[in-house]
Image (cartoon, rainbow, N blue to C red):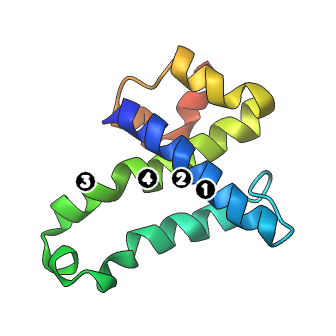
């Protein structure tokens, strides 16, 4: 799950960055924008009644790689800038705890 969060988090971060750039902004240095986009993905289930009525565990498990992965990738970008995308594949997190506790980035 941690490695899936790296992969999906990068893709989600890049997609969100493209959206922000079209508006003349960037996610780099804007933790608040990243947090808003991540929360929007978590609450997007109202469009899908089956998802919305699923147990919380399943909903969180399904969106974890995208939401928490995006937050993780953003924290890595803040720390490593250009090398951020390659570095998380060289030394990926070994658990979802490391994805959630972004302090683990200090070991990259």
Alpha carbon distance from label 1 to label 2? 5 Å
The circle drawn on residue 15 is: 1
Where 33 sits versus 83, above or below?
A: below
Alpha carbons under labels 3 and 1: distance apart: 21 Å
Name the residue tied to disc 3.
Answer: 61
Label 1's element? helix
Upstream in sequence: badge 4 or badge 3: 3
Residue ID at (46%, 36%): 7
The residues bearing labels 3 and 2 have C-alpha atoms spaced at a distance of: 16 Å
Say which of 105 and 73 sits in front. 73
Q: Secondary structure at mark 4?
A: helix
> Badge 1: how crowded within 10 Å, few (<14), some, or many (20+)?
few
Q: Disc 3 vs disc 2: which is toward the camera? A: 2
Which image quadrant for residue 42? bottom left
Question: Do the CB atoms of the residues marked 4 and 2 lie less than 8 Å apart?
Answer: yes
Pair 1/4: label in front: 1
Disc 2: which residue: 12
Task: Measure the alpha-carbon separation of dots 4 and 2.
Answer: 6 Å
Whether the residues at callouts 1 and 2 have beta carbons within 8 Å, the answer is: yes
Q: Are marks 3 and 2 in contact (CB under 8 Å)?
A: no
Q: Is residue 7 visible?
A: yes
Instruction: Say few, some or many: other residues with alpha carbon within 10 Å of mark 4 (under 14 / 14 to 19 / 20 or more).
Output: many
9 sits left or right of 108 in the view = left
Helix, strand or loop under label 2 = helix
Separation (CA) of disc 1 from disc 4: 11 Å
Task: Return the residue nearer the eye: 48 or 41.
Answer: 48
């Amino acid at each position: 799950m941690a490695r899936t969060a790296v992969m999906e988090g990068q893709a989600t971060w890049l997609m969100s960055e493209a959206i922000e750039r079209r508006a003349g902004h960037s996610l780099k240095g804007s933790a608040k924008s990243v947090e808003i986009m991540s929360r929007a993905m978590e609450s997007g289930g109202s469009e899908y009644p089956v998802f919305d009525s699923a147990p919380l565990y399943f909903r969180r498990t399904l969106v974890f790689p995208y939401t928490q992965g995006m937050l993780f990738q953003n924290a890595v970008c803040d720390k490593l800038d250009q090398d951020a995308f390659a570095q998380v594949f060289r030394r990926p997190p070994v658990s979802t705890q490391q994805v959630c506790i972004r302090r683990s980035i200090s070991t990259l």
